[in-house]
């Protein structure tokens, strides 16, 4: 594989600058490569072998892109669909990459944390049933969680079609609101589990996935690259 990349591509790969912005700041002499200002956007370097900084701030290049989305309702978790908008339609041009895909799926009406990446190994690790990565949801429900519901979730529910679920956590937060923690991701699982206990879901929001927590300042529909510490935390799932 080609190990060198153009400087403007390398900066835009971080998701912090568009390709055009990267070219401009490089020409302005704001990028340093191993401490030396370099003004040629087309210059190729091996990103794993040089230290880059913009305005003196180190720039971390990653081979893959990792994006956090606060998914709004009404958008499909798919890469393309002819009839409805998809989560990929919400990703700004400068953050798109070949192979960028959502990690797992949220229903069309579910909101909240969605990770998108072109790192196939991480995608696989986070979804693998063997890894049991926790996914936490807040659900608005009709009704109030009782101790018997908590115990049933903990013991492992059987859905109406006979599917046996892994033990899960259910916490009643206030009348009509609960938190559910799952270690697997079956189709409509939270809705089906709660409905099975006579607690139909009115709305559902995912707030975390493994070590990744939904950024409370990210508006619905917005996308941002993960911070270096968020990527490092996710890598522990990839390597387990
Ligand atoms: N469980 C559901 O029922 N829906 C989702 O979108 C995610 C988990």
Image (cartoon, helix red, strand yellow):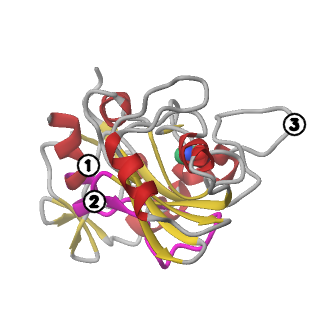
Tell me if label 1 and label 2 are in contact, CB under 8 Å.
Answer: yes
Q: Quadrant of residue 236?
A: top left
Please rate how many residues cluster around mark 3, counting C-alpha atoms within 10 Å: few if below 14, some from 14 to 19, many from 20: few
Q: Residue at x 33, y 70 (%)?
A: 29
Report whether 58 appears left or right of 40: left
Nearer the observer, 55 or 153: 153
The residue under the point 22% across, 62% down is: 229
Give the percent coordinates (x, y) of residue 122: 31, 35
Left or right, 104 with reference to 65: right
Q: Earlier in the sequence, mark 3 or mark 2?
A: 3
Q: Secondary structure at mark 3?
A: loop
Instruction: Quote the CA–CA distance across marks 1 and 2.
Output: 6 Å
Q: Secondary structure at mark 2?
A: helix
CA distance separating discs 3 and 1? 33 Å
Residue 126 is one of the magenta-drawn residues: no
Q: Is mark 1 within 8 Å of ligand 1?
A: no
Indicate whether 11 appears above or below 138: above
Please state which of residues 233 and 152 is positioned toward the viewer in this rendering. 152
Where is mark 3, residue-wise?
83
- Mark carried by residue 234: 1
Give the number of the disc on residue 5.
none
Range shown magenta: 210-232
For label 2, the residue is 230
Q: Is residue 71 visible?
A: no
Classify residue 36 by image quadrant: bottom left
């Amino acid at each position: 594989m080609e190990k060198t990349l153009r400087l403007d591509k390398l900066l835009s790969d971080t998701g912090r600058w568009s390709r055009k912005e990267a070219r401009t700041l490089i020409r302005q002499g704001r990028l340093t490569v191993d401490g030396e200002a370099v003004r040629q956007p087309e210059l190729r370097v091996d990103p794993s072998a040089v230290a880059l900084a913009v305005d003196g701030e180190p720039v971390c290049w990653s081979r893959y892109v990792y994006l956090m989305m606060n998914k709004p309702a009404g958008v499909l978790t798919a890469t393309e669909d002819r009839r409805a908008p998809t989560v990929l339609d919400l990703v700004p041009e400068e953050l798109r990459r070949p192979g960028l895909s959502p990690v797992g799926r949220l229903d069309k009406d579910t909101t909240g944390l969605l990770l998108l990446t072109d790192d196939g190994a991480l995608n696989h690790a986070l979804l693998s049933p063997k890894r049991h990565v926790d996914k936490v949801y807040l659900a608005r429900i009709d009704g109030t969680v009782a101790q018997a519901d908590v115990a049933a979730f903990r013991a492992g529910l059987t859905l109406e079609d006979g599917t046996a679920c892994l033990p899960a956590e259910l916490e009643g937060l206030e009348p009509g609101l609960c938190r559910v923690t799952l270690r697997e991701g079956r189709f409509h699982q939270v809705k089906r589990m709660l409905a099975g206990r006579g607690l139909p879901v009115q709305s559902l929001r995912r707030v975390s996935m493994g070590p990744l927590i939904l950024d409370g300042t990210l508006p619905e529909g917005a996308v941002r690259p993960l911070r270096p510490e968020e990527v490092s935390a996710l890598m522990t799932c990839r390597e387990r």
